[in-house]
Amino acid sequence: MSTGAVAVVLAQTPNRFPGLQTIGKMFFILDIVLFIMFTGAIIARSILVPRKMLESLHHPVEGLFFGAYWVSVSLILNATQSYGVPNCGPWLIKAIEILFWTYCAIVLLVAVFQYYVFFQDERMSVADAMPTWIFPVYPLLVVGPMAGTFIPSQPPEAAYPMWVGAVMMQGLAWTVSLMMYSIFTQRLMTSSLPGPPTRPGMYVSVGPAGYTSAALISLGTQAPNVLPNNVFDTVAIPDGDIAKAVCVLAGVFVILFSFWFFCISTVAVVAGIKQMTFTLNWWAFVFPNAGLTLAAIQVGKVFHSPGINGVCSALTILLVTMWLITAVFHIRAVYRGTILWPGKDEDEK
């Protein structure tokens, strides 16, 4: 997710320079390579130990990351639009339309059935609540930003239903996320902060508001070119202009909620930094904050603000830096056998 998110941010960040697109393509290619490798490893695990697949989906921690797999797929599709469509024929545009609706159908089923499994078979304590409880619906949170990237290249007959579907999917994901936000906030108010090694996972709470803000502003700015006349039965004002005003205001309204969670997560991480050891939660330094960065990019674009664009460029540099730092510590931890080894991570008793 983090590698794909960096590729998407690099494709959209303002204040561009020669070579930036090439750097983004490198992250995109690396993302595809990692995705294929990890998918192969998951398949091999399921073949060698068949019971592990079902156990993984029911695991109170590992099972939540099934949604993360589909977020990775979304980011690959998003980057394919940015890096592939300008260099390919119209066949890719049609393929993206088909893949978009296929993705929406799959992740809607994931959001329904995975939550059902947890509601029916698992009993989780509010005292242990984490933002990762949002993960089953997280693939829907990135539908809006993905559609906002796709729509400009789609023909009108495809762009309109894609716009409507993206707004609906984003609304579902945001509403479910708000419920999970409430549970996580209850945990923080009544229990304690997560342990220092897992506190980077608190940044997951930055993503839902960030990606929703980015989606609303992106879809709103494109509404005048997508919505047919009088779709809302209005006469005096074009429907697309109404949708643009509502979506942009809603996106701006939401973005600081994401920034608020970013600040809380940062203070919590800094407070426990002396006790921190590397865990896979460190990748939350990158992916969720990419959502906040994409939202800021959209705000800078819609308000034509050089100042906000400068902040977005700084955030992009920080994201790439954190990706590099996390990657180094990840490789170091695997080499030392502190993660991704028997008896570690979710296998630890």
Image (cartoon, rainbow, N blue to C red):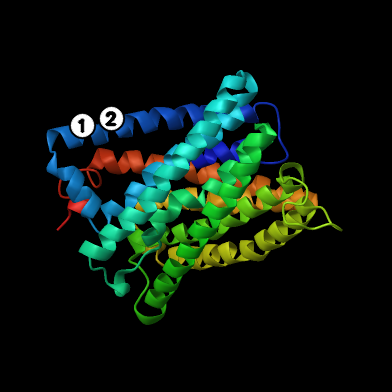
Which quadrant is home to the C terminus? Answer: bottom left
Q: Are marks 1 and 2 in contact (CB under 8 Å)?
A: yes
Residue type, numbered disc 2: Gly
Which residue is most to the bottom?
190
Secondary structure of the residue carrying numbered label 2: helix
How far from the left and from the top, in percent, is residue 225? 75, 42
As drawn, is 174 to the left or to the right of 347? right
Q: Does any portion of residue 345 appear in the rendered image?
A: no
How far from the left and from the top, in percent, is residue 104? 47, 44
Which quadrant is home to the N terminus? Answer: top left
Residue 44, disc:
1
The quarter of the picture where residue 222 lies is top right
Nearest to the observer: residue 309 or residue 153: 153
Instruction: Give the residue drawn at x 38%, y 47%.
Output: 68
Instruction: Give the residue drawn at x 57%, y 48%.
Output: 166
Nearest to the observer: residue 10 or residue 140: 140
How far from the left and from the top, in percent, is residue 99? 48, 33
How far from the left and from the top, in percent, is residue 317? 60, 43
Residue type, numbered disc 1: Ala
Residue 40, disc:
2
Label 1 and label 2: CA atoms lie apart by 6 Å
Task: Give above or below for 189 relative to 179.
Answer: below
Nearest to the observer: residue 186 or residue 241: 241
Instruction: Give the residue drawn at x 35%, y 42%.
Output: 330
Which residue is most to the front?
233
Task: Give above or below for 156 relative to 288.
Answer: above
Secondary structure of the residue carrying numbered label 1: helix
Instruction: Give the residue drawn at x 22%, y 55%.
Output: 59
